[in-house]
């Protein structure tokens, strides 16, 4: 391990992974706040703020931000999710100072100009429109809203057109002041980086960050349920899911293996039964997402409306059977795939910068690869089957768009699973 | 450079890039044939063959192929394009032998079982359906068909439902025999690889490849034109483009810089004028694609139907003005970005395996990074402006889906460009 971690007196954490042989560096500023921490009136504000961070500071116009980083051949990016917001830069080794200067500037000194805000709202309205044209995104938004009915954690991250239109500079300032503080921010860097240098650079730029407590949020309450939207799509896009496990759940690794065996790769049960044996879908895969206190497990598929009923029955049978018959060979394949994925992430500076920041945020430390491998290796068939059984025990959530007359109700899903 | 190249007596080429510090390897088998080389009756066959390669050989069932590679934690993938078909594996260093064994097996010894074929046709019909639900893919298919009217190079790679249904094992065998030969195949490997070992492994497995001449195809004839589809999408998805440059064109690098300045990054003219200044779109970017004897240049945007007319006018003005006013700072930014992109590709084993195979196929050699940088550095403002002027001189191609009542005709595009 080449991980080094420094905590400044302000509470800001700086973590780096020096990867020999590289000439570029990936930097991430990870803020431990996301859509889940918004009040109802703030719905969409985390994402709007992420956009507005690029729209000008006291020292730099929006155009200057873009031009400075791109003049160095670098690029900037950002993403808002349920429990975090992250800002990324990728630059040559000699430009980490520039990258940190820009990242600190946009996070601490943005001006949130009124005219820029109005224009950026238009951009977000266009982004909302583009999600409406992307059924495989839209169906997951609907899925989240139904799995956690009427709770911030289930709301779509982008917000609604009406709510986005309502935001003004004071609403952004208030949100920023409440959440973007030294305690909630982690600066991470991977690739051609030197820890001491990154610490010096980050200290100089982030030391004036005000205090902000870790955001509080009510515990998530998984509800399950049913939503379907008849839209003129060619295919039925469906997500069927269940309550999953949190990051810190004892079943975390077992649930991951179960999801992998059921719908991870080409040799997985869903891929083999639905696509290879029956040709019912081009895309079908499982997912296993974790949050700090809850999680979601399930699968997504797209198929013609006529194939949907058979696809659903076959898939549910795959899930139920796996809790009984998952075998040694499948367990071995899942373990091997998880280990190689770990290694692949270690070989990519951007994946690595993101990973170490996330682990630090969630677990308070970077987990050594050997420790993860030990946990993976220790998993038994019984543990994985039991974790699968636990996953399937919750009320189902069904979300579907397109020609979805044949989508099942949650009760029908539960009945099919129970009949196995 | 750590590139090594070996050409076997059969004509098969093997190229590797040993990247120190990595523990995984990426392997690509690059076949110099794609949708462009299909007869009309074969439309979609390159892509169908790519699918069928995974459906069983004399030694391995479809399931065994998936299970063997995934048991080693690796994965397989493939992609068909206009002038090439490529098969990829990613594995641990010690498993390159397994990866090459499977790749050779599926390319040389596939059985194309009739039942498997019928099922795989259903999968491809589902894939065709999924493209219909992805307007940003669909609009590019329509764009290609219109830019090269009635020619194989413009046809959509996936084929049509009717044509795909018509294929039988003999049609696949005949296509394979004609095109998959030692002369058309390049085996490349990057990452934790040893050239001599990869050569030995590849020689043992690929030496019985029959001869197949490089496929011939009539020269492409760019036609330009107009296609629009009123579909119930939320946004208007539009591509406006022109004849571009081939891989070997003297203007190759200048065209690339022009496209970058116009619509490459956040500081590009289209992004600044359309998104940042006016908030007319969330997504807008240019493209600059090359083929062996032609190319396509243009831009894609998605916006509400009401914003479309203004978006198109502003964008066309950006293009036309850039041919007159593109400046030193923009040239510098584009050069810096191209150089860092080159470096980033060098740091990813999968990007590198693909890149060296493609360069070998197109230029007959792997181009040293220093040579590319020298060419980039030598570019002048006049050359880039002139290349831009040349790009805009051809008949425009316009493809649009959604609420596209306000999409311009090619004549209107040409008039607007000429008026600047």
Image: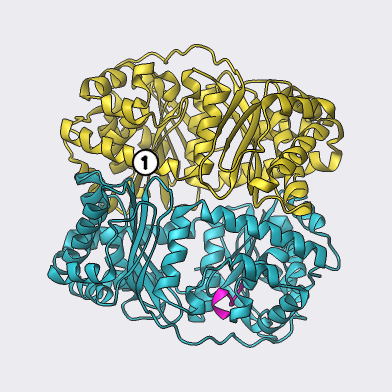
Chain colours: A cyan, B yellow
Left or right: residue A38 compared with residue A134: right
Q: Quadrant of residue B216?
A: top left
Q: Please report the bounds of the magenta region as a residue range.
A: A28-38
Residue, x 60% and y 86% (percent of image)?
Answer: A214
Chain letter, disc 1 residue = B
Left or right: residue B311 compared with residue A391: right
Q: Can residue A137 be seen in this view?
A: yes
Residue, x 38% and y 41% (percent of image)?
Answer: B129
Q: Name the residue under label 1.
A: B127
Instruction: Tell which of A303 and B380 is nearer to you.
Output: A303
How many other residues sit within 10 Å of disc 1, few (<14), some (14-19) or many (≥20)? some
Q: Does the magenta stretch include residue A342?
A: no
- Establish if B9 lies above or below B264: above
Instruction: Tell which of B66 and B350 is nearer to you.
Output: B66
- Dot 1 falls on a residue whose secondary structure is helix
Residue, x 66% and y 43% (percent of image)?
Answer: B285
Coordinates of residue B65 in the picture (x, y in percent): 24, 43
Q: In which quarter of the image is residue A294?
A: bottom left
Q: In which quarter of the image is the C terminus of chain A?
A: bottom left
Coordinates of residue A109 in the picture (x, y in percent): 79, 72
Coordinates of residue A303 in the picture (x, y in percent): 32, 48
Label count reads 1
Q: Is residue A188 visible?
A: no
Left or right: residue A274 compared with residue A111: left
Instruction: Tell which of B133 and A58 is nearer to you.
Output: B133
Q: Quadrant of residue B133?
A: top left
Left or right: residue B1 compared with residue B354: right
- Establish if B256 lies above or below A375: above
Q: Does the magenta stretch include residue A29?
A: yes
């Amino acid at each position: 391990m080449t991980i080094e971690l420094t905590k400044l007196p302000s509470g800001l954490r700086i973590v780096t992974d020096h990867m020999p042989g590289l000439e570029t560096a990936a930097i991430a500023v990870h803020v431990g706040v996301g859509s889940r921490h918004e009040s109802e009136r703030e719905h969409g504000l985390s994402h709007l703020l992420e956009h507005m961070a690029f729209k000008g500071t006291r020292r730099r116009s929006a155009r200057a931000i873009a031009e400075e980083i791109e003049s160095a051949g670098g690029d900037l990016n950002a993403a808002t999710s349920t429990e975090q917001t992250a800002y990324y830069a990728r630059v040559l080794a000699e430009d980490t100072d520039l990258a940190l200067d820009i990242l600190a500037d946009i996070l601490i000194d943005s001006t949130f100009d009124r005219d820029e805000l109005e224009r950026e709202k238009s951009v977000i309205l266009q982004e909302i429109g583009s999600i409406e044209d992307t059924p495989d995104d839209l169906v997951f938004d609907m899925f989240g809203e139904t799995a956690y009915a009427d709770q911030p954690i289930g709301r779509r991250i982008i917000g609604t057109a009406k709510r986005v239109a309502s935001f003004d500079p004071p609403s952004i300032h208030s949100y920023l002041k409440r959440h973007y503080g030294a305690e909630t921010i982690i600066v991470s860097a991977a690739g051609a980086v030197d820890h001491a240098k990154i610490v010096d650079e980050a200290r100089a730029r982030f030391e004036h960050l005000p205090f902000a407590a870790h955001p509080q949020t009510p515990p998530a309450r998984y509800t399950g349920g049913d939503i379907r939207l008849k839209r003129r799509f060619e295919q039925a896009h469906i997500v069927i899911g269940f309550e999953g496990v949190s990051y810190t759940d004892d079943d975390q690794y077992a649930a991951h293996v179960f999801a992998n065996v059921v719908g991870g790769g080409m040799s997985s049960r869903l891929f083999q039964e639905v696509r290879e044996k029956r040709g019912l879908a081009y895309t079908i895969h499982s997912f296993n997402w974790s949050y700090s206190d809850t999680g979601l497990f399930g699968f997504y598929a797209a198929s013609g409306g006529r194939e949907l009923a058979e696809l659903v029955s076959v898939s549910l049978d795959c899930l139920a059977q796996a809790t009984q018959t998952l075998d040694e060979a499948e367990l071995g394949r899942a373990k091997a795939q998880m280990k190689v994925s770990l290694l692949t992430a270690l070989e990519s500076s951007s994946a690595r910068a993101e990973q170490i920041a996330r682990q630090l945020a969630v677990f308070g430390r970077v987990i050594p690869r050997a420790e993860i491998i030990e946990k993976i290796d220790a998993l038994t068939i019984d543990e994985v089957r039991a974790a699968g059984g636990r996953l399937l025990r919750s009320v189902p959530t069904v979300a579907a768009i397109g020609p979805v007359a044949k989508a099942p109700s949650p009760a029908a899903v539960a009945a099919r699973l129970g009949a196995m």
